[in-house]
Image (cartoon, coloured by chain):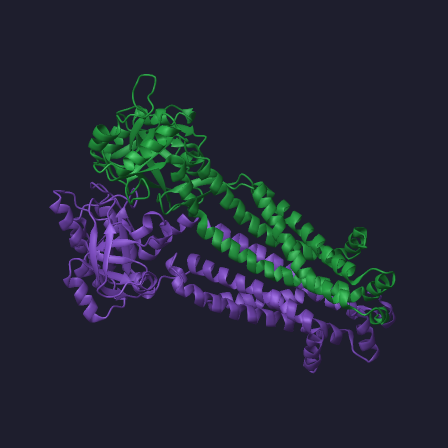
Amino acid sequence: MRYLGLIFKNALRNRRRSLLTISSLALSLCILGVLMALYYALFHGEAPKAQMLRVVTRHKVAIAFAMPVYYRDKIARLPGVKQVCTWQWYGGAYKDEERDRSKFFPRFGVEADRFFEVYPDYRVPAAQKLAFQKDIAGALVGAHLAANQGFKLGDKIKIKGNIFPFDLDLTVRAIYDSDIDADNLYFPLKYLQQALEARGSKRSYAGTFTSLVDSPADVPRVSTAIDEMFANAEAPTHTESEYAFGLTFLSFLGNIKLALISICGAVTFTILLVAGNTMAMSVRERVREVGILKTLGFTPRGILCLLLGESAVIAMLGGIIGLLLANLLIGVLHHGPAIVQQTKTLTLQPPVLAILLGFSVFIGLSSVIVPAWRASRMSILEALQDAD
Amino acid sequence: MPIPITYNIRNLAVRKTTTVMTALGIALTVAVLCAVLSMVEGLRVAFTSSGHPLNLLLIRKGSGAELSSVVSRNDYNEVIRFRPGIARDPDGRPLASLELVTIINLPSLEFPEGVNVNVRGLSPIGLELRNESRLERGRWFQPGRREIVVGSEIGSQNPSAQVGKSIRFGRGEWRIVGVFTSSYPARNSEIWGDLDQVRSDLNRFDACSSVLLRAANPVALRALASEFAVEQRLQLEALPETEYFAKQTDSGDIIRYLGTFVAIIMAVGSCFAAMNTMYAAVARRSKEIGTLRVLGFSRFSILLCFVLESVLISLLGGLLGLLLILPLHGLSTGVGSMTTFAETSFQLAITPKVVISGLAFALIMGALGGFLPAFSAARKQILVALRQI
């Protein structure tokens, strides 16, 4: 403990080098922090509370196949199911989306009267909620989408149809926000059905059903019950928790799991090499000084403590700064578009934090242990003669 | 007069550990960047080398992709099929194929929970238009039967899609009777079956997805494209097939952004490390620098000398990094497209572009990391430098 002052003095001696080492460590740990938080959220994360109560049913073959609408009532009658809401993907094109697909935002027809019962966690002012439910051509838009596109209450939105042979003429009636998504546009399913009927189409469409169950424990039971009920029907179904359903879209981004693991691995090794190298270098350069310390009466153990302590302090500082940076970066990600819903609620979980801090100290200690040990064992004469 | 480069090389050899460690740090940074670039390149190669130059794809205006497009059979028969300018096969039939595209969910090796795969209903004309495709195993599907052939990438990625096995969609089981491979990589991630059979299974008798046709010559291609674009009865857009595929290259964007972002931050970190190494080198060789100045080398030569040394380290790192990712070349992986809503497999490609970008990246890191230390070396006063231990 009494070496603490000396350790800090030593760490500050070559300020430029300490600063560079700390910055390179901090940058690497920042990246590592964000990536590990992402990995943790994607593959070990838990669904937000509200989502744990919802299951999504789609056609077993693929999401592009519609199911008969009467499935909704059959699902709603199952024990443990509180409410069911039908969804239908509309697609279409808004403004210049045809040319620039990156501007595309998802649009769904939903049952306006049931939607908020299944999604109580979507935050919408009561008056707007009512206005949306009353207007068959109303639109409910996410706060993030509204900010991006400049949608305000009362704005007209015209969407050109492609899958469906008609356009949508909607008026923004409500703006919602939630921890799961804030990038979608919802409109009443009734609009879709009436427009189809007006064109003489007798086909009914139900893309997916989202069911609200009584308790999280009901999820597996209800899922199997739904799938068994329709196993031999005209359209067999596949039911999973809403969270798992969201994760299936991850495969669209390519093999994210492998990419995250390999990038994390590369970053880790880089830090080990880079930081370890500089810290070891500073110890090697100080062998002569160690000789002087020894003549002053420092024990080998004391010297070992001094050298290890210094690099631990530097590594720790780098780690803390890196994690602060990572936190900042994650804050920025929250405001970006939700490529996967997990980026909206991404946080540095305590286990991730602990691992990373431990890791940074480990880097500090492991990189100097060999040269420090060697220096502390050297005889005074040898150390004083060291030319390097 | 510049200081001979052998001076730098010998110096690097003397400080082996530090050199190798710094170079390895740079190597890994370059490896991350190049791995991402090779993915993007692979994707680009897969899509831009796909499509016949004379093929024209007709989809519904605004749909952007076949999956969300609707083309009616009547329109095909009455307005599209017999246009002048469309090439004909030896029997005199116009090479214009009405097609139905949908997706099904298949478990793959990488994603056991299943990925979306395109299923395409084709008429005999459609197969004729795809005569660059060859059978690898088995035979083609027969009209009127519930038979399908799968692309070679699907065959190798999806354990459930093998000749002799069956896949369930539509109204029942479909037998896999063959595996095909196309010289257009994007096609190898599709499943093909008989158009009429697929149509009746999916209950889509009139509403198909798209029309693919072959123009007689490049002039006819342009003429047809503009004719269809203004044809009021159709409301279709006409895209050259090559362009349609090229548009899908953006499906790798997210991985590219993520990878580039990580690589750049890592690069700044590695730059700091290179700086540290070079500052240490400058400090240790203070006497040498003084001596060099006494010998008559100018400040500029000293500056150049140390920047060069840093660049040499980073070049070594860059080469090492490229060596590290070389085994990735040809590795097969898949990425989904938000346009087609299906997964396309492609091979990572380490093209000259990737190699050059990687090396350039390393050189920039080295030059930036080396400049400040070199500058401080060049500024040293001769007497002070000589007196330093």
Q: Residue at x 48, y 54 (%)?
A: B257
Q: Which chain is purple?
A: A
Quadrant of image for the N terminus of chain A? bottom right
Q: Residue at x 60, y 65 (%)?
A: A25
Q: Nearer the viewer, residue A48 or B240?
A: B240
Q: Position of residue A330 (x, y in %)?
A: 46, 65
Q: Position of residue A237 (x, y in %)?
A: 26, 46
Q: Residue at x 81, y 51 (%)?
A: B6
Q: In the figure, is residue A367 to the left or right of A322?
A: right
On screen, residue B212 above or below A374 = above
Q: In the figure, is residue A65 to the left or right of B184?
A: left
Residue A235 placement: quadrant:
top left
Q: Position of residue B84 (x, y in %)?
A: 29, 25
Q: Residue at x 59, y 50 (%)?
A: B31
On screen, residue B71 above or below A257 = above
Residue B228 placement: quadrant:
top left
Quadrant of image for the C terminus of chain A? bottom right
Q: Which chain is green?
A: B
